[in-house]
Amino acid sequence: MAKRIIRNNLPTDQLILEAALRVLEDEGHGGFSIPKVAAKAGVFQGNVTYYYPNRDALISALAELINNKYREQFQQMAVGIKTNKPDWAETYIAWLVDDAISPKTARVFPELWSMSNAYPEIAKVMDGIYEEGIRSLIIALGHDPKAPNSSELWRVLRSVAVAIEGTTAIYGRSKPSNKKFLEVKSSIVSTFAPQFKAAHKVALKK
């Protein structure tokens, strides 16, 4: 069995995935290749294919890595929500909108959407990013995601997810100070924050 080389405190397989993420960010789906990932990771191509035998296997593992990163990010943000503050919903939705045009999201997500047309497993992962993010948020708010009273929360937050995807697609190359983006951000927050708060109150009813 190949030795799990450690660089920067990462096992080789994880080092390769982090390098693959950087290649996807820099080169896009069209420029994504095992040689480029190996060069970015500072390993031989054989090291890459030992863990990920082909490009498809590497892409699938990369999609799972991205899913886990976003799930962790959503969970951390959700846990920090303080519903006793009057602007808790506005703050959370504004954070989602800002993240939608962050360099990381704006570079990677369009590539993943494109790849999901050719890779059903990636389409599944992309669906999971949103669904798991919503589930984590509902749990962090103290609700049971499966309870009937949570159905309105699911509806509102799925609608927010759709708005967020559109924000990435249209304003992903914009700066946070872009006037048109700020207008859209204000509209998304003012539209969905009241619905979010109302759905939260409905879910509180037993």
Image (spheres, helix red, strand yellow):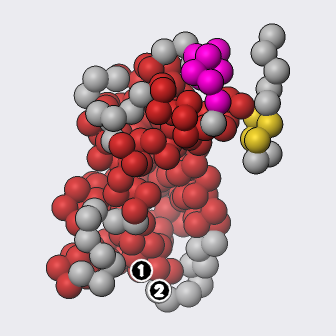
Let me know if residue 195 appears in the view: no
Quadrant of the drawing holding the C terminus:
bottom right
Q: Secondary structure at mark 2?
A: loop
Q: Is residue 132 above or below residue 39?
A: below
Instruction: Give the spatial CA distance, label 1 vs label 2.
Output: 5 Å
Q: Residues within 10 Å of mark 2 (few under 14, many from 20)?
A: few
- The amino acid on which the numbered mark 2 sits, given as a three-letter code, is Asp
Q: Residue at x 39, y 72 (%)?
A: 98
Quadrant of the drawing holding the N terminus:
top right
- The amino acid on which the numbered mark 1 sits, given as a three-letter code, is Glu
Residue occupied by mark 2: 87
Residue extent of the magenta highlight: 43-50
Residue 134 in magenta stretch: no
Foreground residue, 93 or 51? 51
> Tag on residue 76?
none
Tell which residue pokes out farthest to the bottom in this image. Answer: 86
Percent across and percent down for residue 86 are 49, 89
Percent across and percent down for residue 19 are 56, 40
Foreground residue, 26 or 67? 26
What predominant SS class does the magenta segment belong to?
helix
Question: Hey, which quadrant is residue 115 in on the image?
Answer: top left
Residue 48 in magenta stretch: yes
Percent across and percent down for residue 39 are 54, 35
Residue occupied by mark 1: 90
Q: Residue at x 58, y 58 (%)?
A: 73
From the viewer's perspective, tell me whether residue 69 is left or right of residue 4.
Answer: left
Q: Residue at x 47, y 68 (%)?
A: 200
Q: Secondary structure at mark 1?
A: helix
Foreground residue, 62 or 167? 62
Contact check, label 1 and label 2, Cβ < 8 Å: yes
Q: Residues within 10 Å of mark 1 (few under 14, many from 20)?
A: many
Q: Is residue 110 above or below residue 183?
A: above
